[in-house]
Every structure is written in C-alpha cells, then in structure tokens.
Amino acid sequence: MPLKFILKSAVLACFVLLSPTLKAQDYQKLHQNAILVDTHNDVLIATMQGLDIATDLTGKTHSDLARFKKGGVDAQIFSVWCDETYGPGKAYNYANTEIDSLYAIIARNPSKITLTRTPAELEQAVKQKKLAALIGVEGGHMIEDNLTNLENLYNRGARYLTLTWNNSTSWATSAKDETEGNLPESKKGLTDFGKQVVRRMNQLGMLVDVSHTGEKTFWDVINTTSKPILVSHSCVYNITPQFRNLKDDQIKAVAKNDGVIHLNFYSGFLDKDFLEREKQFFTRHKTEIDSLKNLKWPLFDMQSFLVKKYGSEVQGLRPPLSALLDHLDYIVKLVGVDYVGLGSDFDGITSAPQQLDDVTSFPLITKELLARGYSKKDVDKILGGNFIRVFRANAG
Ligand SMILES: [Zn+2]
C-alpha cells in the first residue's frame, strides 16, 4: 500500500550477461510468450484521484495500459484498498466505488482490457491480447463483518480477499498488530466468524490471501482452508526480517497447501538495510523536506523534486535487482519452483530495486531468471503458471 516516494527516473540498466546460448533478444521473446500474472498493483488509488490509465502516465505512476502491454503483463490483479479510517458504513461502499472505477476503465477501453473472473476468461483475454483485469480486495474490514458483502464483492468480480491490511478486523489479526501491538495470545488469529469467512471464500472460489495477516492468523487459515491459498505480495523473513515477510515454516506450509507466494518489489521488504539508508536520507535533507511539507506540496511533486535534485543519491538507496531474485531463489531452494510468483505492489510502494522503474521493467526479471539458470518451463511457472494453478484449484 501507499508509501509513495522515491522511485522513477529511468536508470540505464547495466545488463547482466546471459549465458552464451541465449541471445539478447531471446529473453524478450520468451517473456512476451509467457503468461505474466502480477497479483498486486495499486494504481486504482491513482484512478480514484482522477488519473486515467488509458493515457500515458509515465512519470506520474508505475502503471498505465500502454506500459502494461510494453512490460508483457497479461493479467493484472488490481488491488481494491482503503485503510481503517474507512470504518463501518464506509469501507464496503468505498470498495464498490473503487470497483466501479475499474469497470469504467474497462468500459472505456474494451479493446485493451477485460474483466476476468475465471481461469477460462483469463485464457481468453490472453488470446485476444487484452489485459486480463482481476480484482483483489485488500483488507477484510471492507466486508464490514458481513458474509453477504463478501458474496457481493465476489459477484462483482473480486477473486481474492486479503484477510487483513495492516489493521486487524474483528475476526482476523494483522501482522502489524500481532507484532507491534500488545495483543494477548488469546486475541490473535481467526475468530469463529473468521473461519466462516475462509470457508465461505473456499465455497465461492475466492482466493484467501494472507499477505498482511499475522502469523497466528496465517496458521489458523492453513488449518481451516480446503483450497490452496495465495500470498499476493510478501517476501522472505529470513533475508529481510520485516513484520509481514514469511518465515521458513510458513513458506513450507504454503507449499504443502499447494498455494503460491508472490513477491513484493518494495525495497524495504527485499533489503534489510534499505529503511536505515532511507532514514539517513530523510535526516540529511530534513530541513528541505520539512519546508516543502510546510508549503503543502503534493506528495508526488515533492517526490519528483527530490528525485530530480538528488538523483544519484536516491538511486543509491535502492537495492540492486538481484535482491528480488535472491528472495525468489530462496523460496525455490526451500520448497521448489512451483510456489513462487510476482506481486509487484507497483503504485503502492515508494521504492523498488534498481532497474524496476515501472511495469515496463518485468522483462528484466525474465532476463535475470534465465541468467540464473532457470529453464523456460520454470520461467513460465514463476511468471504466471503457478498462479493459474492456484486460481484453477480455487475456481474448480
Ligand atoms: Zn499491501
């Protein structure tokens, strides 16, 4: 979710050398031929603020329709999100308004993007060379403790629900609250109603997403679900001990459940030293940043200004692209290649590794996968095959 800051500005990629058998253009071809499913993108937040992703939003967002195409993105799960300040009476309505905004984009651009509710529709969209638009609702508070609301969201196309965002619900505790709050053990995890939510989702064919949920909630889900689960945008705790990254036993449990973990591109989840570097940057430029804040500069303008002024310094804050691949390798070594994918969190994050400037950067990941010795079959699984397997298992 939004942390907006530092990113953008094209960096010339220092290309990693491919193995001699792979020509430079091969990765592009392989990438374009594979089905790429990104399980988390927050550009609907920008849409709700009036930006139109049918126009060129380069320099303003990470994503727009033309850039999805350029990046070889075949299916995008658009996150429907609001924070806890949208309480009862507001959150569910807001979720619907955000879904309306996606419907409006689709209605205005029928030759480019299509609502996708089933694995068959996803396949059809790929054939028609349209962006398959899926909906993921991020934050269980948006169902407002009501199973009918859950069903209505499903009926409008939502194919996953992230049980919590950073805020807990009355029925599931979040990673943030479980790690930072003073919750007694007895208050952690899923309540009976929470288990009902999971079971109802299983019946509907809606993926249970445990990104953002606390460990206790995670284990309660594992013990309740009858279908493979999704981790739509999280990373590896053993590399970056961050409150909502996954520990090894959780990664193993997802594999045993035949679910899938899609990796978040946020620098702070990928590189354990990133937040410290960022903090030092803010300290170094505190007076200037405070003065911009006092002038009430819009966040985006402030970011652009700082990136322009401190280009190389800002670039230096970002981890290398290899950081993302290191998390991916870790999961593959621990449980195999069938349980990992990409959930960028583009347009919800303030910094991504170098070279991952926006949604056009996805081919560079394929290039790096090949350089690391992954086969074409492996790449197909990582880019989208693993998600499609889980999607089918839930829908069927
Ligand atoms: Zn999130």
Image (cartoon, rainbow, N blue to C red):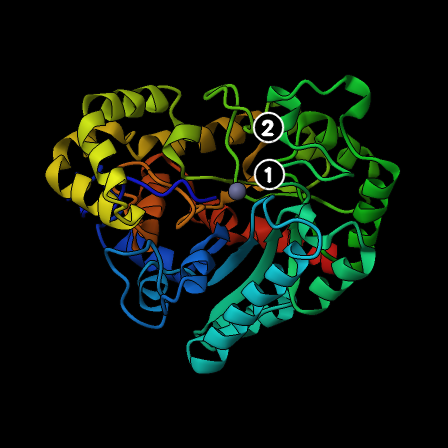
Query: Image check: 12 left or right of 80?
Result: left
Q: In the rendered structure, find residue 176 and report the number of the disc placed on it.
A: 2
Residue 19 in view here: no
Depth check: give the residue in front, 145 or 32.
145
**Three-letter residue code for mark 1:** Ser
**Three-letter residue code for mark 2:** Lys
Quarter of the image for residue 94 reads: bottom right
Residue at 38% across / 36% down in the picture? 373
Query: Image check: 319 left or right of 256?
Result: left
Residue that label 1 marks: 211
Residue at 31% across / 41% down in the picture? 5
Quadrant of the rendering where the C terminus is positioned = bottom right
Residue 157 in view here: yes
Is the residue indicated by label 1 positioned so its CB lies within 8 Å of ligand 1?
yes
Number of callouts: 2
Query: Dot 2: what SS?
Result: helix
Gap between marks 1 and 2, in whole Å? 11 Å
Residue at 82% across / 45% down in the picture? 226
The location of residue 305, given as percent across then percent down, is 17, 44
Task: Examine the rendered structure and indicate whether residue 225 appears above or below residue 202.
Answer: above
